[in-house]
Amino acid sequence: MKKLSIPLLASVLLVAACGSSSSTPTTAATKTTAPSKAASAVLISAKSEPGVGVVLVDAQGKTLYQFLPDGAKKVSCTGGCAAVWPPVTLPAGAKVSASGGVKASLLGSDPDPSGGRVVTYGGWPLYSYVADSSPGSHSGQGLDLNGGFWYVMSTSGKAVK
C-alpha cells in the first residue's frame, strides 16, 4: 500500500471537505447509511455551555446548530455545506430520543435531500460543526457561512443569539 505524504493527504482532505458536491458522505460527515443494532436510538440532550447557556447536544456532547436558511421547514445544507456542517442523521429503523431537559414533543425528522432522514427540533434540522473539536465547544455560533447564519439551539427550540 502506497503512503501519502502529509501535505498531499491534507490537500486531499481539504478538497473533499470544501469542493465536493457529491451525495457520497465524506469522513467529516456523520452520515449513517446502514443501521446497526446499537443504533436503535439517536439521543438529543442538553448541556450548559459557557457564553451560550443550555443548548442542544448529541450523544457525544457535541453542540448542535440550526441553519437560518432552513426556515424550520427543510434541510438546505447539502453537498459541500454538509461536509462542514454534518446533519444529525436518523438511521432507518432508529428513533430519536430526548434527555436532560430536551422536549420529546419537539423532536422529529425530515427528509435529507442526500438520502435518509435528518433529526429536527421544533421543525429545525439539526447539524454539528466539524471545527468543534471537543464536547462543549461551540465555535460555529453566530457564523455566517455556506449561505446563512448558524446558531446553537436552546431547549425551547429557539436560536441562541
Image (cartoon, grey):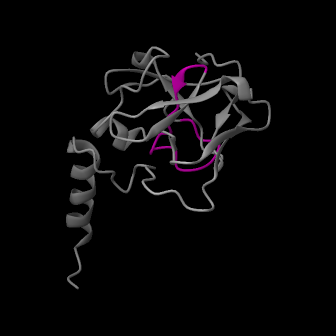
Q: Quadrant of the C terminus?
A: top right
Extreme front residue here?
A: 93
Q: Is residue 161 magenta?
A: no
User: Which residue occupies 77% across, 38% down?
Assistant: 99
Which quarter shows the N terminus? bottom left
Kindly report the secondary structure that dominates the magenta region of the rendered protein: loop
The image shows residue 149, relative to residue 22, as above or below, that is: above
Which of the two residues, 11 or 122, is positioned nearer the viewer here?
122
Q: Is residue 62 left or right of residue 68?
A: right
Q: In the figure, is residue 157 to the left or right of 141? A: right
Q: Position of residue 101 (x, y in %)?
A: 79, 30
The front one of 136 and 42 is: 42
- First to last magenta residue range: 122-138
Query: How many marks overall?
Result: 0
Say whether residue 127 is magenta: yes
The image quadrant of residue 18 is top left
Q: Where in the figure is residue 75, as x and y percent of width and height?
A: 40, 27
Q: Is residue 84 above or below residue 66?
A: below
* Residue 150 horizontal/vertical position (percent): 47, 24
Q: Tell me residue 4's x, y (percent).
A: 22, 74
Residue at 36% x, 25% y is 76
Q: Residue at x 27, y 44 (%)?
A: 23
Task: Using residue 53 as the reference point, say whether residue 91 is left or right of it.
Answer: left
Residue nearest the observer in this picture, 21 or 92? 92
> Looking at this rendering, what residue extends furthest in the bottom direction?
1
Q: Left or right: 77 with respect to 11?
A: right
